[in-house]
Image (cartoon, grey):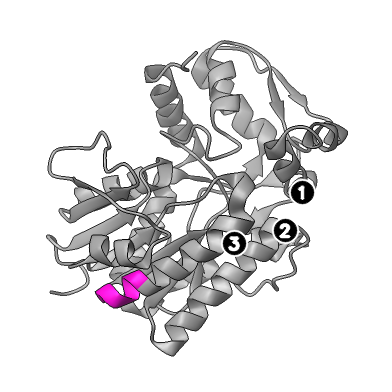
C-alpha cells in the first residue's frame, strides 16, 4: 500500500472534538478508523470501530494500535493534571505505538514557545514561562528523541487555539462563548479583544494531521498546520453573534480576576499562567507546511463559525 491508498487502518486515541474531526476526515478518504477511549463507547458513524484502551498503559496502546498505518494521539489529561499525567501518557504512547509498528501523529499547542515577538514558527525557540509550556516542551523533546532513536516513527502537528463542532470544554472558544451567544447573553473573554490572534477551525487542524500521516517526509519534525488568516477576538466574536442572531455583547475579563479566582478554583489558576497569550499579539505562521505540502482548502472563519454555531444550536447546553 502507498501512503494514500484507501482502506488502511487509522487509530485515534481520544474521542473529543479533535479526535472526532480526525475521524471525519479519514472516513471521507475511505480509510478504516478505530476510535480508542477508556470506556470503549462512543456515538460513531456506521463502520467506525470503537474499542477500550488506556493511553497511559503501553500494553493497552500496543493492543489497540495493532495493524494500524497511523495512530493519532488526540487524548489529553485533565487540564489541571498535566504535570502528573502527561509524561507517563507520552512514554506509553511512544512505547506502545512503536511496538505496534505504526506512525505516531501527535497534535500539540504552542505553549512551548512562551511569549513570542512576531510570528510563531517551528524555529521559534522554546522559552516557556509557564509550567504547562515547560511540560509541552519536554513532551515534544521526548517524542522527537524517540523518533531519532528509532523507537517510533513520529511527526508533530502544532496549531493555535481551536474551535468547532464538539469543542465544548476543550478550548477557550467553546461552551463559555457559543452558548451565551446563542442566548444573546454577554460573554466574558480573556485578554485584549483588538489584538491579532490566530485561531484554527478544528476540521482544519484534523486535515493537517492527516496530511502528516500520509507523508513519510513529515516524520521526525514538528509542523505548523494551515489555518485561516489571523484576525482579532472582536472580529471572531462579531461573526459568532451575527450567526447566532444577536447583537455583540462581551466584556474583557480583568486579568486580576483570574489570579483571585485561581486561589480557590484550580482551572482558573491554570488559565491565569497562560494569560500572556491573550494580552499580546498571537500570530501563527505555517509557511513550512505550505511549501512542503500546500496550504490546502483552509476553511474561512465565516464558514467555520456557521458550522460551529449550527452544532451548538443542535446540542443545547445540559443543565
Indicate whether 212 appears above or below 251. below
Name which quarter of the figure residue 179 lies in: top right
Circle nearer the viewer, 1 or 3: 1
Q: Which mark is residue 206?
A: none
Residue where numbered disc 1 is placed: 273
Callout 2: SS: helix
Q: Nearer the viewer, residue 53 or 217?
A: 53
Q: Is residue 170 visible?
A: yes
Circle nearer the viewer, 3 or 2: 2
Disc 2, disc 1: CB below 8 Å?
A: yes
Q: Can you give x and y, in whole percent of width and height, for residue 278 in the image?
A: 74, 44
Indicate whether 169 appears above or below 24. above
How far apart in space, not on screen, are marks 1 and 3 (Cα)? 23 Å
For label 1, count other residues whose C-alpha is less than 10 Å away and answer few (under 14), some (14-19) or many (20+). some
- Residue at 40% of width from left, 74% of height from top? 154
Q: Is residue 35 left or right of residue 249?
A: left
- Residue at 31% of width from left, 61% of height from top? 60
Callout 3: SS: loop
Residue where numbered disc 2 is placed: 131
- Residue at 24% of width from left, 64% of height from top? 63
Q: Which mark is residue 285?
A: 3
Q: Nearer the viewer, residue 218 or 172?
A: 172
Q: Can you give x and y, in whole percent of width and height, for residue 76 in the image?
A: 49, 51
Q: Is residue 107 left or right of residue 129?
A: left
Amino acid at each position: 500500500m502507498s501512503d494514500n491508498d484507501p482502506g488502511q487502518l487509522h487509530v485515534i486515541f481520544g474521542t473529543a472534538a479533535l479526535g472526532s474531526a480526525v475521524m471525519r476526515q479519514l472516513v471521507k478518504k475511505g480509510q478504516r478508523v478505530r476510535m480508542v477511549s477508556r470506556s470503549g463507547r462512543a456515538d460513531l458513524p456506521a463502520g467506525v470501530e470503537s474499542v477500550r484502551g488506556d493511553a497511559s498503559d503501553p500494553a493497552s496502546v500496543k493492543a489497540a494500535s495493532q495493524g494500524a498505518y497511523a495512530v493519532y494521539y488526540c487524548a489529553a489529561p485533565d487540564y489541571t493534571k498535566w504535570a502528573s499525567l502527561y509524561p507517563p501518557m507520552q512514554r506509553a504512547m511512544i512505547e506502545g505505538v512503536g511496538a505496534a509498528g505504526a506512525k505516531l501523529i501527535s497534535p500539540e499547542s504552542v505553549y512551548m514557545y512562551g511569549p513570542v515577538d512576531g510570528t510563531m514558527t517551528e524555529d521559534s525557540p522554546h522559552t516557556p514561562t509557564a509550567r504547562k509550556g515547560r511540560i509541552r516542551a519536554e513532551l515534544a523533546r521526548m517524542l522527537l528523541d524517540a523518533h531519532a532513536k528509532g523507537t517510533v516513527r513520529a511527526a508533530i502537528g502544532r496549531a493555535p487555539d481551536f474551535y468547532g463542532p464538539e469543542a465544548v470544554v476543550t478550548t477557550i472558544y467553546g461552551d463559555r462563548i457559543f452558548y451565551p451567544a446563542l442566548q444573546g447573553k454577554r460573554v466574558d473573554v480573556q485578554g485584549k479583544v483588538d489584538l491579532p490572534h490566530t485561531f484554527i477551525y478544528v476540521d482544519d487542524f484534523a486535515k493537517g494531521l492527516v496530511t502528516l500521516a500520509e507523508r513519510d517526509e513529515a516524520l521526525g519534525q514538528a509542523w505548523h498546520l494551515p489555518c485561516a488568516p489571523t484576525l482579532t477576538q472582536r472580529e471572531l466574536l462579531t461573526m459568532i453573534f451575527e450567526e447566532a442572531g444577536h447583537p455583540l455583547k462581551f466584556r474583557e475579563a480583568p486579568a486580576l480576576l483570574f489570579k483571585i479566582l485561581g486561589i480557590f478554583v484550580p482551572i482558573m489558576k491554570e488559565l491565569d499562567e497562560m494569560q500572556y497569550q491573550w494580552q499580546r499579539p498571537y500570530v501563527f505562521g505555517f509557511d513550512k507546511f505550505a511549501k512542503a505540502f500546500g496550504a490546502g482548502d483552509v476553511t474561512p472563519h465565516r464558514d467555520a463559525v456557521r458550522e460551529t454555531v449550527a452544532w451548538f444550536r443542535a446540542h443545547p447546553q445540559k443543565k
